[in-house]
Image: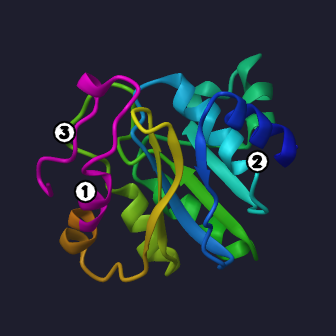
Amino acid sequence: MGKISKKILIGLSWNVSIDIPDFNKSIIIFAPHTSYLDGFFGKLFLMQTDLNYKFLSKKEFFKFPLKYFFRLYGSIPVSENKEYINEVVDIINKTEKIHIILSPEGQLAKTNHWKKGFYYMAKGANIPITVAYIDYNKKEIGIKGVIRDTSDIKKTMIEVSNLYRNVSAKHPSEFTLDKRFS
């Protein structure tokens, strides 16, 4: 499937940077997220890797018939309450190799107040944060960097904002960095 997904992306004139760090576990944040196409391109990108990955999706999406699509896509359901952070940390701790993927914005709609659950998951499981991106102006998709030191939330969130600073969304007017850390 990786060769097919690569051909699709190249056929659509996308540049792919598959410089995946060599570790067994991470939280992968993927932004900007302003269109459902982001998930499609992100899935094509991930299919080219050897990663064991799972997407986090709202529990409400796992109703018939959509639950079958989301499971095939590689999603796991999470609740909206803060308990989901502990649920994900438990999944990470019980699995030898896993990368959890989510949008730091937490939604498709424009927000300048990003969710910090990804930070608490990484810190709770003592794993790095891999910063993935999709840039529609440059037609690039890949990894911007890895944040290994998650000891300070403010420092981590500033680093995340800096990595996404010049990335262009599908719908640029719908993407903004977290105003608290940019």
Q: Nearer the viewer, mark 3 or mark 1?
A: 1
Q: What secondary structure is marked by label 3?
A: loop
Specify the label residue 161 is tagged with.
1
Task: Name the amino acid, label 1.
Answer: Ser
Q: Is residue 180 above or below residue 61?
A: below
Q: Main secondary structure of the magenta part?
A: loop
Task: Name the amino acid, label 3.
Answer: Asn
Residue at (53% x, 59% y) in the render: 28
Query: What is the quadrant of residue 152 in the picture?
Result: bottom left
The answer to whether the residues at label 2 and label 1 have Cβ atoms under 8 Å apart is no
Residue at (58% x, 34% y) in the render: 39
Give percent across and percent down for residue 36: 53, 24
Count all numbered tags in the image, as a single digit.
3
- What's drawn in magenta, residue-wise? 159-182
Specify the label residue 47 is tagged with.
2
Q: Nearer the viewer, mark 3 or mark 2?
A: 2
Residue at (67% x, 40% y) in the render: 43
Residue beneath disc 3: 112
Label 3 to label 2, Cα distance in Å? Answer: 30 Å
Decide which of tag 2 and tag 1 comes sooner along the chain.
Answer: 2
Q: Is residue 33 left or right of residue 54?
A: left
Decide which of tag 3 and tag 2 comes sooner along the chain.
Answer: 2
Give percent across and percent down for residue 75: 68, 42
Is 161 one of the magenta-colored residues? Answer: yes
